[in-house]
Structures are given as structure tokens and as C-alpha cells.
Image (cartoon, helix red, strand yellow):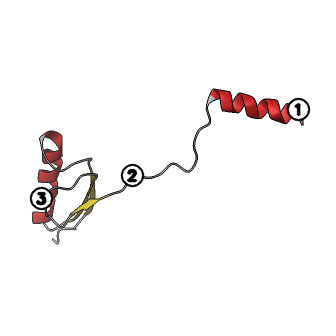
């Protein structure tokens, strides 16, 4: 019976020390078994090709403070 190869996504903020190292070892294990692995990290320090860095996503809007919301409501009532 043929073994089915899986696509695996691992998410971590780093690839060194502690839990990061455990996720990295999992990724290396799955790669050695022939699975397609991508490990997304914020800070990449290892040269492995399955490790990919990601950029911080910008927020689509800036939340207004309570004072700004109050002033906006006040302006809307006046007009």
C-alpha cells in the first residue's frame, strides 16, 4: 500500500531554543519522511528551506480612543 504524503504547516515565532526547537525537530522529521512541510516563523535563524519568515500584518484600521469617539458623536449631534 502506498503511503499518502501530507502537507503540513507549522507556526512558530522562532526556530531556536525550547518549544521552538521542538517544532523545528518535528518539521525535520516530517521532511525526512517525505511530507511537504512549511514552518512559518517570525525570526529565522536556521538555513533550512522549509522555514519561511512572515511579516507582521498591519491592522486595517486604528481604533479610536474613548475621547475621540465622544468628540465625534458630539460633532455629529451638533450638525
Say which label, 2 or 3, has the lower sequence index.
3
Q: Comparing marks 2 and 1, which lies closer to the viewer?
A: 1
Specify whether 55 is left or right of 76.
left
Q: Comparing marks 1 and 3, which lies closer to the viewer?
A: 1
Give the quadrant of residue 9.
Answer: bottom left
Q: Residue at x 25, y 64 (%)?
A: 6
Q: Position of residue 19 (x, y in %)?
A: 17, 41
For the N terminus, the image quarter is: bottom left
Task: Tell me if label 2 and label 1 are in contact, CB under 8 Å.
Answer: no
Q: In this view, does 13 lie above or below 49?
A: above
Element class at badge 2: loop
Q: Residue at x 66, y 27 (%)?
A: 67
Task: Tell me if label 1 and label 3 are in contact, CB under 8 Å.
Answer: no
Element class at badge 3: helix
Say which label, 1 or 3, has the lower sequence index.
3
Q: Which residue is drawn at 12% across and 59% down?
A: 28
What residue is disc 2 on?
Answer: 56
Question: In the rendering, which numbered label is found on residue 78?
Answer: 1
Question: In the rendering, which numbered label is found on residue 28?
Answer: 3
Amino acid at each position: 500500500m502506498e503511503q499518502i504524503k501530507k502537507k503540513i504547516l507549522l507556526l512558530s515565532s522562532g526556530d531556536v531554543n525550547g518549544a521552538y526547537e521542538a517544532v523545528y525537530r518535528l518539521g525535520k522529521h516530517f521532511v525526512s519522511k517525505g511530507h511537504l512541510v512549511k514552518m512559518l516563523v517570525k525570526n529565522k535563524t536556521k538555513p533550512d528551506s522549509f522555514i519561511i519568515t512572515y511579516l507582521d500584518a498591519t491592522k486595517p484600521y486604528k481604533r479610536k480612543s474613548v475621547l475621540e469617539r465622544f468628540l465625534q458623536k458630539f460633532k455629529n449631534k451638533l450638525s
